[in-house]
């Protein structure tokens, strides 16, 4: 059997281009269906290549998942770190800067968030360990931000900080899930929507305090 060369593609498409197409399709499949339900055959069919060729390019299903996960995780970490390092702005507080950075980083692959937060990964696999590494790194950054926020509000309770970090993770996931279902919404529109929701939340809480 003839082995494709490093530069060879299929149907006249350069290999590098075909690999990008495979990764884009696989990221969407993993994000929408989860690792367990995604098949290499389905990804190959979407791209228009054979399953053996896809295996030749990327190896096993787990190798393909990792090839999708690593750029997503690196991109999100970089976006969050950059947003948190920016000077505080009265017009856009840290939470909104981080959300805007997340939306911008995910804009071309919104389902990619769920590649990282996939509950169907095989336990104790390289895929699960690598995804856990990125999730811990993002949680550590979130913990830093929430602890700073609570200190400003006069709270130093570590359980408050832990609970708020968990709530923040859930909020981000819920917002991205909503965003996936509203493809017309740009990263800037989503950030402005979050600003309005946060403002409404503060108003509701202030009103409750007055009633109490």
Image (cartoon, grey):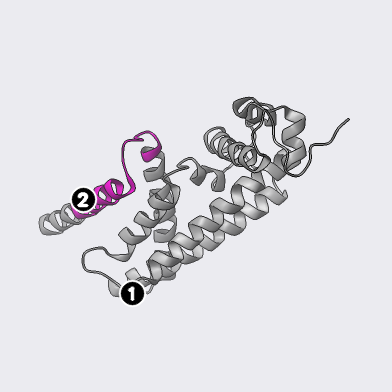
Return the residue nearer the eye: 176 or 165: 176
First to last magenta residue range: 179-201
Q: Mark 2 points at which residue?
A: 196
Q: Quadrant of residue 155?
A: bottom left
Near mark 1 (Cα within 10 A), the count class, few <14, some 14-19 or many ≥20, is few
Residue 125 at x, y percent in the picture: 72, 48
Q: Which residue is drawn at 76% across and 44% down?
A: 6
Q: Residue furthest left?
A: 210
Q: Which residue is drawn at 30% across and 47% down?
A: 190
Can the viewer see residue 162 in this picture?
A: no
Q: Give the secondary structure at mark 1.
A: helix
Q: Which residue corresponds to the image point at 66% horizontal and 49% vertical from the top-left?
A: 128
The image's mark for residue 90 is: none
139 relative position to 154: left or right: right
Q: Does the magenta stretch include residue 180?
A: yes
Describe the element under mark 2 as helix, strand or loop.
Answer: helix
In reply to whether residue 150 is colored magenta, the answer given is no
Q: Do the residues labelled 2 and 1 touch (CB within 8 Å)?
A: no
x, y percentage for residue 127? 68, 48
On screen, residue 47 above or below 176: above
Residue that badge 1 annotates: 151
The quarter of the rendered structure image containing the C terminus is bottom left
Residue lying furthest front: 12
Q: How far apart are marks 2 and 1 (CA)?
A: 24 Å
Please state if 152 lies on the left or on the right of 125 as rendered.
Answer: left
On the image, the x and y values in percent for residue 91 come to: 21, 64
Q: Which residue lies furthest to the right in this view?
A: 1
Which of labels 2 and 1 is toward the front? Answer: 2
């Amino acid at each position: 059997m003839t082995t494709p060369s490093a530069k060879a593609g299929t149907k006249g498409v350069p290999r590098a281009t075909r690999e990008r197409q495979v990764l884009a399709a696989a990221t969407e499949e993993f994000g929408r269906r989860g690792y367990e339900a995604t098949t290499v055959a389905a990804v190959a069919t979407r791209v228009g290549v054979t399953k053996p060729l896809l295996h030749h390019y990327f190896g096993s299903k787990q190798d393909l998942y990792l090839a999708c996960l690593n750029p997503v995780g690196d991109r999100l970490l970089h976006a969050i770190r950059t947003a948190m390092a920016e000077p505080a702005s009265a017009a856009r507080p840290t939470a909104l800067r981080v959300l805007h950075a997340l939306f911008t980083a995910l804009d071309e692959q919104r389902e990619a968030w769920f590649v990282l937060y996939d509950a169907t990964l095989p336990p104790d696999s390289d895929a699960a360990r690598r995804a856990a590494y990125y999730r811990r790194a993002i949680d550590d950054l979130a913990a830093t931000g929430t602890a700073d926020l609570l200190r400003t509000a006069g709270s130093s309770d570590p359980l408050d900080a832990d609970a708020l970090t968990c709530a923040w993770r859930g909020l981000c996931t819920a917002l991205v899930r909503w965003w996936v279902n509203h493809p017309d919404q740009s990263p800037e529109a989503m950030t402005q929507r979050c600003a309005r929701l946060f403002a409404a939340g503060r108003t509701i809480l202030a009103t409750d305090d007055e009633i109490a």
